[in-house]
Amino acid sequence: MKSDDFPSSGDTASPAAERRYGPGSKPTLGLIPVRPPSRTATTATTATTATTVAGAPARTAAVPSATPPTPTDTAASRGDPACALARRAYPLGSTVPGASAADLSAFDTMVRGADVVGVGEATCGSSEFCTVKHRLFRHLVEHQGFRSFVFAVRWGAGVRLDAWVLHGTGHLRTIMDEEFQAGSSRWNTIETRDLFRWMRTWNVRHRDSPVRVAGVGADPALFDTTGEAAPAMRDRERVVADTILWWQRHTGTKVFLSAHNSHIAAETPTSVPDHRPETPGRILREQLGTRYVNAGFTFGQGSFNAIDVNAPGTPWRRFDIGPAIARGSEDVLEQVSRHDWYLDTRTMPPGTARDWLAATHPTRSLRPYWPCNEYENTRLHPSYDILIHLHHISAAHRR
């Protein structure tokens, strides 16, 4: 087996990984103190975007000029939502897989009793979303008995990856290069490779309790999108949800679902037209009730990989993005704490925080293509049971 497939260093985070993903901060226990940063850093109404091609200097381009949705929140004006949220938020001590689990005790409570936990991402190509998912999956495997990792690639790709993590069949490098093409190339990263390596390491050490992999992405070729779009999109979302439910029943395992925020959400953003009337997350909620728990990501600023719509056919490249618009979700969430943090939207007492989470706000939701309209009108609750906020993100490392 190639060394690129299966590391010999075990399942602990190496110094190289620590440098790659950024230093893991020392976890802080308990609720976050109300220490919001200066508001001036998060109220910019404009930003610039820089793209960097490997080996070339960055070039600067304007962020798309599309007017973001107008927030409809009026209840939050009765108080400061950032301070109210801070009283219920917990610090996320590290984004590094394998870091101390001391900061995840509250997360354990939030997902206890779930058969499927969906964890999203606000971009399709940022390192920290991948590494936090890796960290949470490892934690749920080790502490709550989760044994399946399900994500949005075609079924055949999942079969090959499952055979590799279970039995070492084939070579991970080859599988990733062959399967993670076109729309699935977002997964062809060092962060994803390291996740599968850890799964293989776990299975070698726990042959009687292995982790599994499944792909649940619906192939667009299976659906007629030449006619009316809404039925085809609805059928695709239903197939994804039904495949997840079938896998959970078939394997009898607890499932960790990795997908974009828009797919794990239990509610479709109000700014999205009727061509996507249901999300897989909404279908899972209808079928599983409280046995489906989801966690959505938000972020302050940073970088991500995407396909440049102005240069079709080119590889994914890095884009940098600055602070979000004033009065958007992220403008408030950035002020909750200087730490990265998470909270349970379901347990908010009546008052400012609960009202603000239930109201509609423009929220960033970046897709595989850029530039795009980066905001969607979203109610953070009931869309997400758990909200995870990262102040800074960086582009994932392409293989």
Image (cartoon, rainbow, N blue to C red):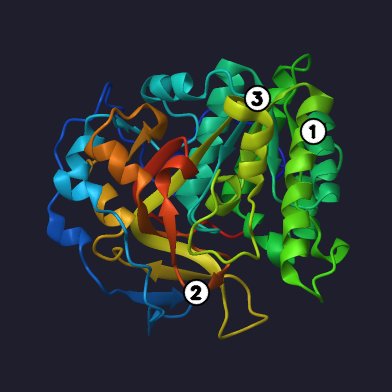
> Which numbered dot is residue 115?
3
Q: Is residue 267 left or right of residue 376?
A: right
Q: Secondary structure at mark 1?
A: helix
Q: Which residue is mark 2?
A: 372
Q: Using residue 360 as the reference point, say whether residue 223 is left or right of it.
A: right
Distance from the alpha carbon under mark 2 to that under mark 3: 34 Å
Q: What amino acid is found at the position of numbered circle 3 in the picture?
A: Asp
The amino acid at mark 2 is Cys
Q: Position of residue 392 (x, y in %)?
A: 34, 53
Residue at (80% x, 51% y) in the render:
175
Image spot of residue 136 (x, y percent): 52, 32
Residue 285, placed above or below residue 69: above
Q: Which residue is mark 1?
A: 247
> Looking at this view, is 289 or 396 the one in front?
289
Q: Residue at x 17, y 50 (%)?
A: 77
> Hey, what amino acid is under mark 1?
Trp
Q: Is residue 275 above or below residue 143?
A: below
Determine if residue 1 is in view.
Answer: no
Per the image, label 3 sits on a secondary structure element best described as loop
At 84% across and 44% down in the image, what residue appears? 160
Question: Can residue 281 be spotted in the picture?
Answer: yes
